[in-house]
């Protein structure tokens, strides 16, 4: 699994993610990229099964970016779903369990008509080889414009604490610092709780604005299991 947060700020959406990949509790990567540029001004972040037919999503999703230019999450999401379906349907259906774990992707950016931050979700469950229709994503806490996906069940205290610290009207820099710290603190909380599916050497982050996408990372300071 993983831990991903999306935060609404003034004139942008900010996403941050951990960088750990495990398979059956075995660490296979401490530096997995889980946030991806999917248009000139939009990003997507994914939790769940990290590899399809031996390829990470960071290897697969550039193929979508090459074909689609925008203009916003609501327009991108249905195309993104069809792209994901085409990829996962290449897996031999006789290979039972090859796509187990499901996937949830958040697609974030600005609504081109209003300029307001917008976020959509595309997901599938279990070993199903197709994704559900794209839909607008709702924040988990109505008082905070924050979205979480990933292994949050054991981190509800951290999720609640993060929501309590959210401030409407954050600048881009404030939102980046907030989101990155939320992921790093989530890694520490997961480690203290014995949750082995969250961690990694870095917290990756992205900013989606009307002018483009910024991607970067920060060392977590949390030893990777």
Image: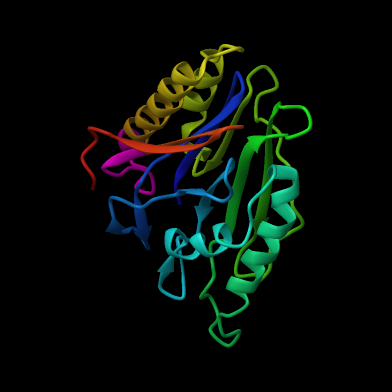
**Residue extent of the magenta highlight:** 191-203
At x 59%, y 49%, the residue is 39
In the image, residue 88 sits, relative to residue 160, either above or below, namely below
In the image, residue 142 sits, relative to residue 214, either above or below, namely above
Q: Nearer the viewer, residue 127 or 104?
A: 104
What percent of the width, then of the height, locates residue 159? 52, 27
Q: Nearer the viewer, residue 129 or 216?
A: 216
What percent of the width, then of the height, locates residue 205? 42, 36
At x 32%, y 31%, the residue is 188
In the image, residue 97 sits, relative to residue 14, either above or below, namely below
Secondary structure mostly seen in magenta is loop
Q: Nearer the viewer, residue 119 or 197?
A: 119
Q: Residue furthest bottom?
A: 94
At x 46%, y 41%, the residue is 3
Whether residue 135 is in magenta: the answer is no
What percent of the width, then of the height, locates residue 149? 55, 42
Q: Quadrant of residue 176?
A: top left
At x 69%, y 44%, the residue is 71
Image check: 156 left or right of 110? left
Image check: 132 left or right of 59? right
In the image, residue 7 sits, relative to residue 98, either above or below, namely above
């Amino acid at each position: 699994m993983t831990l991903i947060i999306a935060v609404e700020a003034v004139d942008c959406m900010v996403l941050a993610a951990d960088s750990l990949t495990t398979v059956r509790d075995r660490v296979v990567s401490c530096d997995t990229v889980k946030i991806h540029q999917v248009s000139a001004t939009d990003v997507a972040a994914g939790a769940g099964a990290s590899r399809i037919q031996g390829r990470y999503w960071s290897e697969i999703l550039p193929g979508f970016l090459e074909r689609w230019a925008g203009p916003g999450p609501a327009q991108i999401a249905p195309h993104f779903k069809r792209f994901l379906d085409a990829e996962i349907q290449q897996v031999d259906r006789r290979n039972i369990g090859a796509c187990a774990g499901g996937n949830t992707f958040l697609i974030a950016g600005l609504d081109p008509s209003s300029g307001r931050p917008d976020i959509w979700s595309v997901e599938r469950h279990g070993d199903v080889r197709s994704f559900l229709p794209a839909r607008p994503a709702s924040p988990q806490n109505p008082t905070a414009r924050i979205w979480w996906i990933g292994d949050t069940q054991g981190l509800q205290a951290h999720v609640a604490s993060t929501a309590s610290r959210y401030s409407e009207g954050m600048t881009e820099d404030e939102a980046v610092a907030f989101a990155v710290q939320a992921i790093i603190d989530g890694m520490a909380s997961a480690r203290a709780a014995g949750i082995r599916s969250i961690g990694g050497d870095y917290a990756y982050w992205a900013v989606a604005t009307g002018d483009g996408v910024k991607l970067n990372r920060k060392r977590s300071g949390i030893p990777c299991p």
